[in-house]
Amino acid sequence: MEMAQKGREIPLFTMVAQNERMNVQLLMERVATGQIVIPYNNHHQPTKPQGFGLGLSTKVSASLGLAADEDRLDDELFKVDEAIRAGTHAIMDLSTAGDMDEARRAIIKKVPLPMGSLPIYQAFAEAVRTKGSALALEPEDFFRVMERQAADGVDFMGLHCALHSGLLTTAKDDQRILNLVSRGGSLLIGWMLYHGKENFLYTMFDRILEIAKKYEVTLSLADAMRPGAGADSMCRSQIEELVILGELVKRSRQAGVQIMIKGPGHTPPNQIATTIQLEKQVCQGAPYFVFGPVSTDVAPGYDEITAAIGGAMAGSAGADLLCYVTPAEHIGLPNAQDVYRGVVASRIAAHVADLAKGYPGAEYWDRKMSQARRDQNLEAQKTLALDQERLSDFHSNEKPFCKKCEKGCAMAVAGEYFQELPWEC
C-alpha cells in the first residue's frame, strides 16, 4: 500500500496490471486506497501473484489441510496439485492436526499462488496438544503462531477480529436456526465464555497489525456470525459484526496493511446482491472474499453447484474472490476429486460474474468458443474450454466428432444460407 501511495511502480504492480488488462496507474491508485489487494509476503514471493478487488477478474480460492493426525501430507499435496490443475487463484491451508508447520511449509514451497491460513486453528490445536485443552490457550500462544506462520511466508490470514462479547447477546436474541457455523468463531466464543474475557483478536488488533505489516501479510477478516442457513441470512448479529469489520478496515488502512473481508456463507438468492453491496458500503470498498455463498440448503452432495449459483450472483454484484465449495460440503472432508470439481465449479461462477461485470476479455472468450463450435473445430474448443481435460475425455473414444444430430445438424442445415453473413457483428 505504501509503495502505491508513493507512486512507485514496482514490477509486482506491472505484472498484475498486465495480467488483468488494467492500466498500471489505475491499479496503483486502487491498491493505495485499499480497493485492490495483492497478497505478497516477501518470505514467499509467489511467482504467480494475484490481485483481488475493483475492476479485476473474479478469482477463486481453494481450501485444504490436515484434519486428523493420521492424515498423510502427500494426500494434501496431491489436492494442492489438483486445485492448481483446475485453475485456482489462491490456496488456503486450514490444517488443524498433525505436523501443521511441516504441512504449511511444504504447501508454501509448492504453491506459486497467494497462500492463506487461519492461524487460530493451529493455536487452539497446539493448546490441546501441549496444555490438554483449547481453553488453556493464552493470547501470547496465538501471537507466536501468527508470527511463525507469517515468517514462513503466508500471504494472507483469516482472522475473526470483529467478534466481541456484545455480539453474543445479539446472536442469542436472533434465535438463529444453526446458531454458529464458523469453526474459528465458535472456538473463540467458547474461550470467551469460559474465561469471561473479551476476544483478544478484537482487543489486541494493533498487535495483529504490527505483525501483518512486518511480514507484509494481507488480512482477511472473517465473520464469526456468518449464516449457516439461508433463513439466518442478514440477521442482526451478522450486520453488527459487519459494522465492526468496517471500523477495522479503517484502522488497517491507516496502518498501511492490506485488508479484505470474508463472508457471508448461506445466503438466499434474493439477498445476495444486497449483502455484497452492504459490505462494499460499510467496509469502504474493501475486496470481498465470499464463502460460496451457498444459495439453497436442500442439495447436500451438490453444493459445488449451489455455491456456483450463489458465487455467480455474488460476483456479478461486486464480490472479488470466491472461496470454493466442494460436493463434500455438509457431508465430510473433500477428496482430491472433490477439490478439482469445487474449483472448476467456482471458476465457472467467476467467469459468469466477469461476463456480467464486463471484465475485459470475458465476452471475447465466449465468442471464440462460439466460433469454434460453428466451425466444428474440436482442437480450438479443447484449447478454449474452461476445463480442457473434461472436453477431451468426452472425445477420447475416437468416435467422429459430434454424432448427436447426424444429418440434422442445426448449423449445417441452414449453414449455406448464413455463411455469407458476417460473423463479427
Image (tube, rainbow, N blue to C red):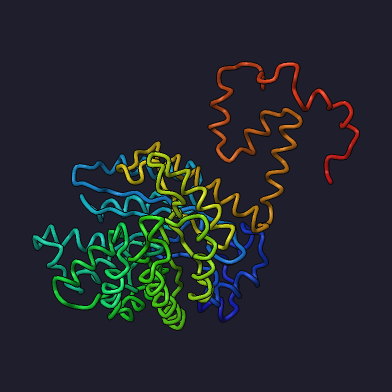
Q: Residue 224's x, y, as percent?
A: 33, 66
Q: Is residue 301 above or below residue 18?
A: above
Extreme residue in the left direction: 132
Residue displayed at 68% across by 45% down:
365
Residue situated in front as seen by the camera: 142 or 316: 316
Residue 344 placement (x, y as % from top left): 50, 42
Name the residue rendered at 30%, 57% in the picture: 178
Q: Establish if 248 lies above or below 339.
A: below
- Identify the residue at image location x=84%, y=26%: 414
**Front one among 310 and 385:** 310
Q: Is residue 375 above or below residue 189?
A: above
Which residue is painted at 46% across and 68% down in the image?
260
Q: Which of the 4 image quarters holds residue 348?
A: top right
Depth check, front residue: 342 or 16 = 342
- How many numbered discs, if any? 0
Residue 227 placement, left or right of 31: left
In this view of the protein, can residue 15 be seen by the observer?
no
The answer to whether residue 243 is visible is yes
Residue 184 screen position, x and y as percent: 28, 62
Pinpoint residue 400: horizontal percent, then vertical percent.
66, 17
Quarter of image, res 377:
top right
